[in-house]
Amino acid sequence: MITIEDIRAAAERIRPYVHRTPVITSRAIDAMVGAKVYFKCENLQKVGAFKARGACNAVLQLDEATAQRGVITHSSGNHAQALAYAAGLRGIPCTIVMPSSAPEVKRRAVEEYGSTIVTCEPTLASRLATLNDLVDKTGAHVVPPYDDARVIAGQGTAAMEFIEDQPGLDVMMAPVGGGGLMSGTAIATRALAPYATLYGAEPDIDSDAKRSLETGVIQPPPQNLSIADGLRTSLGEVPFAELRHHHVQIVTASEESILEAMIVLMERLKVVVEPSAAVTLASLLERPELVSGRRVGIILCGGNLDLRTWLKPS
Amino acid sequence: MITIEDIRAAAERIRPYVHRTPVITSRAIDAMVGAKVYFKCENLQKVGAFKARGACNAVLQLDEATAQRGVITHSSGNHAQALAYAAGLRGIPCTIVMPSSAPEVKRRAVEEYGSTIVTCEPTLASRLATLNDLVDKTGAHVVPPYDDARVIAGQGTAAMEFIEDQPGLDVMMAPVGGGGLMSGTAIATRALAPYATLYGAEPDIDSDAKRSLETGVIQPPPQNLSIADGLRTSLGEVPFAELRHHHVQIVTASEESILEAMIVLMERLKVVVEPSAAVTLASLLERPELVSGRRVGIILCGGNLDLRTWLKPS
């Protein structure tokens, strides 16, 4: 298992390269939920998401010979940018396998960090075949988005900072997609705030983490596409084991609540959040009784919203 | 004329009640403009806009007898919230005359601060008649949104902080609507960074400030409605005199550029801005040669965007 010592080591390792993000609050949101809610702003993190933490922790641990052969992953989301950022810090080659369906804005972001994009068909099979082919040819080192102990330890540094800066939290919440953030959060919280309740949040039309924990078997994500695009993936095996071990409970939210929570967060906190970052608050808007009167920590996972499609004058 | 001493006194007076807002930067925006651009985040100010500064400075100066009769203004925008906030601090009555066309979200924001709303017809004549009638009845003290030396001195504290926190600015920019922010900014900048170029920005379909300064006579705003709704007003007389005296130059931006700049600001800075706050950067996206290679300070005036109408899933 991954331990708090792994997270402490990660924090030391990545400190010069990531932001200690601020914790912010809103009296209006507290009133809506009937609790004192603290938001850890990973949307203000490097690359706009907590993913910078895990990617940096993985890349900075590579021995020199491995690093020089470069790193590679398949992703069209925040992990792609994060790995590109981390590789750029070490000045090593980085290749991102991206489906042809990836939006131009995501491609550009990766290229700005000096990485190479290899386009594949928009299927998991094509992604993996393309990735494996490149690994065979170049000897590049794969940094997975969540199913990796180094990545999880890196993600856990967000909760560690959060508890250091805001002691006394009764509840700790993060969204669950592949489970990298939530498992790192669970490990840090169990060590540093052992009596806190751990809630992982996911869209209710895409509640594969909930069904996985209920059945004891990792379930595939359904075909339903939530607006919380960052969470459209099944749990990784390492995160699954950690979530079970640390008794993480899964809460869900409707698509309507996720959109409402996005609006509330942006209106009240004045920071940009992506839909995945709103699922936590959305679940509390639906069931405030879960946290009534308690001190709740919420990790706002990211702020990479494609505003060219989302923002429209009325 | 209003002096830097008025602004210094305002800063002392309002310090406990307003945020010293952060200054943030983006390498991506610097690259777009070809300059080093610093953003003063008045969108993160109390009530979500610089208006809190001027309203507090006015309300805190009232003698006790006047204050007890209450304050009043007509506004459907950020000044209404700001005056409600300032009156709440002193625990005095506050009445806001609002047109029946004002969005519900604005009404609720004012009511949350404990103010009374009196609804009028959505015409300037009705606003003024309703206001004057209430003043006659209650003896309430009018705090105008911009045409007032106390308000202007309060708004000038933003530029004063900005120059203190970020010395060496070559250019200072703010948007121009009624001119309260820009005139306070001009006074503070001429005193503290005398060689800086002063640019006030407005929509080019609504360039009444530019025409007013060119003709030497205050011009009415045109019928064209810019998305920069906070700037839909003619210059006040006091601001007009200050802008002339301090040689403020007016720059303009198209509606397309304003929307583009809003997207760029929110994507790159991860903070929410209202359209009025994007006109400055928009003018530089159109004419980067104006500031090429210089250190540019931009006051982001506010973040009160009606996200229920602006934010739409694609």
Image (spheres, coloured by chain):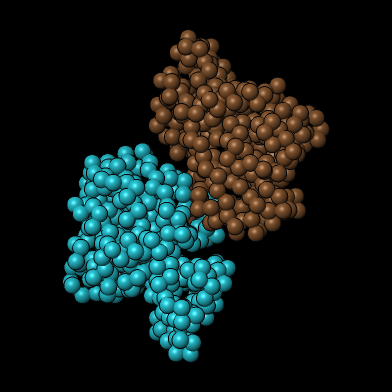
Chain colours: A cyan, B brown
Residue A225 x/y as whole percent? 38, 68
Image point 51% across, 48% down: which residue?
B272
On screen, A119 above or below A287? below
State the residue in front, B5 or A66: A66
Image point 19% across, 52% down: which residue?
A195
Residue A102 visible somewhere in the drawing: yes
Q: Quadrant of the N terminus of chain B?
A: top right
Residue A33 x/y as whole percent? 29, 44
State the residue in front, B194 or A186: B194
Residue A162 x/y as whole percent? 34, 51
Image point 71% across, 44% down: which residue?
B170
Residue B254 x/y as whole percent? 69, 50
Residue A77 visible somewhere in the drawing: no
Image-quadrant location for residue A209: bottom left
Image-quadrant location for residue A294: top left
On screen, B126 above or below A10? above
State the residue in front, A33 or A246: A246
Image-quadrant location for residue A229: bottom left
Determine whether, in the image, residue A233 is placed left or right of residue B204. Answer: left
In this figure, what is the number of numbered marks? Answer: 0
